[in-house]
Image: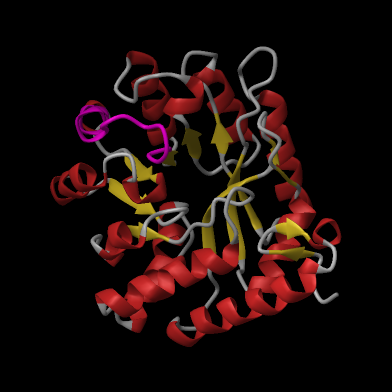
Amino acid sequence: MSASRVFGEDAARLGEAALELTSLEDEVLALARRELPTGAYLDSHVHLGRDVDGHELTGDQLVSDLDRCEVARAVCFAPNDPGEDGAFRAANDLVLAAASAHPDRIVPFARVDPGRGAEAEISRMAGHGARGLKLHPVAQRFRPESEESVAATRAATELGWPIVIHAGFGARRLARPIAELAESVPGAVLILAHAGRGDAAGLADLARRHEGIWFDTSLATLVDVVGLPPARLLFGSDRPYGEHASALQLVALARHLAGWTDDEARAVLERNAAGLIGDAP
């Protein structure tokens, strides 16, 4: 069997079906690469650890995925595993350990619950080399515009961190709450996951008025990605909920339909995210 994981799943668990799926995944990757320029792709949305719903991914498994799909690096943060105290400390430490084991492949972000010691955990994670923040209003049940969320966003912004915010399944209308958050923290860089699927049209309109609003492509719909400017888009897979072959094909299709240049496609695939995490151009 040519791959240990196929479309993000354990090949051994798939059994004989993995043989056919491996061939199919190769075809999907080949189609994507045909449309995309070469480069050091950066996946801006990966969860490492074990979610309370059972989804799981280790650093070693991720690096194997990255190698198979020719993706250079990934921004990683904890899944929904807040721990008994709700502060995400143990889950964040797993991400830090994976980044330490794979420093050239994994970029660690902190994950917090704004109502559970968020500012202290942000400070601690900054001291250990974290480079951004993940917030999930649905899983942690808070309003993006709440006082606690504003405080966490402000703490991250003062560190120069971008903030990834869940904006997909389960999210309520987000344009007004995200606008309030952006106005409360001038200079904040807010990356709306899943291309703002929870309120795509409203958030796209908001982005025209706020230069700090960005989007990632993880588990997004094609129509939403095509409708967004490539200068504000970041490639993402949402591993282990999504996988790289389909994520790359989504970007390839969007590039084809929207007519992005090679330079614009490279910005989506790597340069935009690299700039936001502070990498030199």
Residue at figure coordinates x 38%, y 35% from the top left:
157
Q: Position of residue 4 (x, y in %)?
A: 81, 65
Relative to the observer, which residue lies in front, 62 or 109? 62
Examine the rendered structure and indicate whether residue 35 appears above or below residue 79: below
Q: Quadrant of the N terminus?
A: bottom right
Residue 153's quadrant in the figure? Answer: top left
Residue at figure coordinates x 39%, y 33% from the top left:
158
Residue 244's quadrant in the figure? Answer: bottom right
Please tell me how many numbered marks the rendered image carries.
0
Q: Is residue 160 left or right of residue 95?
A: left
Q: Quadrant of the C terminus?
A: bottom left
- Outermost residue to the front: 17
Reply yes or no: does residue 13 show up in magenta.
Answer: no
Residue 89's quadrant in the figure? Answer: top right
Reply yes or no: does residue 172 show up in magenta.
Answer: yes
Examine the rendered structure and indicate whether residue 99 appears above or below residue 159: below
Q: Position of residue 98 (x, y in %)?
A: 74, 47
Q: Position of residue 166 (x, y in %)?
A: 43, 37
* Res. 254 in view: yes
Residue segment shown in magenta: 166-181
